Amino acid sequence: MNAANESTTAADGDQVPMRAEWGTVLISSMLVMFLLLAVVSKTEAATLGSGDLALVVERANGSVQIVETTGNSALTRVEGLGDLSHASAVFSRDQRYAFVFGRDGGLSKVDMLEGQLVARVMQSGNSIGGAISQDGRLVAVSNYEPGGVKVFRTDDLTLVADIPALYGAGQHSKVIGLVDAPGRRFVFSLWDAGEIWIADFSAGDQPVISKFEDIGRNPYDALITPDGRYYIAGLFGEDGLALLDLWHPEQGVRRILPHYGKGEEKLPVYKMPHLEGWAVAGNLAFVPAVGRHEVLVIDMLTWQEAGRIAVKGQPVFVMGRPDGRQVWVNFAVPDNDSVQVIDAESLKIVNTLQPGKGVLHMEFEPRGEEVWVSVRDQDELHVYDTASFERRATLPAQKPSGIFMTARASRIGL
């Protein structure tokens, strides 16, 4: 009999396997243990908290970096997202997935926990941002070419609705200022047409479109107030802002601050300011002025001008700390090496920082104790303490631009 198949009898009469059988059992046990460890590791990775994470756009390489904000460290890089020269992102309700809008018309879905690109569609020839619906089921993209908005399901990025921005004699308009609003609505502006549209998906996946015409020339960007009530479009072609009360849209669009800057010569505009990063402190709103070295202060109770703050250059982003006490401002060239901090109570500049050339974006951590700053020309991310203004961390990044905290998932319009 082959020795490999031999067995012996124990004192109780049971058959006991010899060496080969023991080896098979040992190998099987090790395999089971390995599989169990793999499952445990996978489970641990999947249960990593998402609320501590942020996504950083690396504009030159078509990649994003995922970072964590407790230890201020980089976790991983996700590549293959296309042209990110003017990219932005929104997050799923559970903060796990980021939807990244590329300038080339690409819509990418990124798993923040696994650090993977899970889906991508090329939905237009040129796009400029997007929004996610109140229930988290729809993601919308605003397009320059062809002008319009496309809406997709967030689970698999299948197309739900195509809304061409047609005006006049069938002309296409660029779409800008796309935001989400309560009631499963998307609101956006038409640059060429001078209009604001509401796409209402509350009754299903076929939207009801409301159009508001003659709001002013060339709306260049827009914002929605944190309570979701007011949609405000900035006007590039003329002075003033256009305001739509989403509680009472039947009242139409109202012009506010129409005389701001009237009779003054504007400077050349080196970079269009962004309104979606506006700051709110109490009843005051802080908005970048187009073509001027000023931040405009608006009383939100009356929608009248409450002041102007002279700043170092042409403001691009005017960002409010979550508690509303500070407003941080960055600038277009040639002053894009600097950041100024405004005290929201006194309306005075309390600090000027110089992180380096190419400061493109700022993002506060959810409770505002630190702020992240992208410094494109130095290939760095800087993290500052907002109380002491000391730099707490410097991280390498490849031409960073937009920084997006997952906490945006629970905020309207961001």
Image: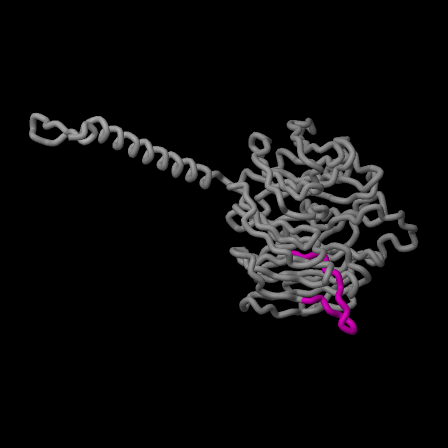
Question: Toward the viewer: 169 or 254?
Answer: 169
Residue at the image position 70 percent from the left and 53 percent from the top: 104
Question: Toward the viewer: 184 or 67?
Answer: 67
- Quadrant of the image for the N terminus? top left
Q: Quadrant of residue 322?
A: top right
Residue 366 in view of the camera: no
Q: Which residues are magenta?
A: 164-179
Q: Position of residue 140 (x, y in %)?
A: 62, 58
Question: Toward the viewer: 180 or 279?
Answer: 180
Q: In the figure, 356 relative to 56: above or below? A: above
277 inside magenta stretch: no
Q: Quadrant of residue 312?
A: top right
Q: Residue furthest front?
A: 1
Q: Residue furthest bottom?
A: 169
Q: Is residue 40 left or right of residue 255?
A: left
Question: Toward the viewer: 358 or 283?
Answer: 358
Residue at the image position 75 percent from the left and 66 percent from the top: 172
Q: In the figure, 56 relative to 104: above or below? A: above
Residue at the image position 85 percent from the left and 57 percent from the top: 259
Q: Position of residue 83 (x, y in %)?
A: 69, 48
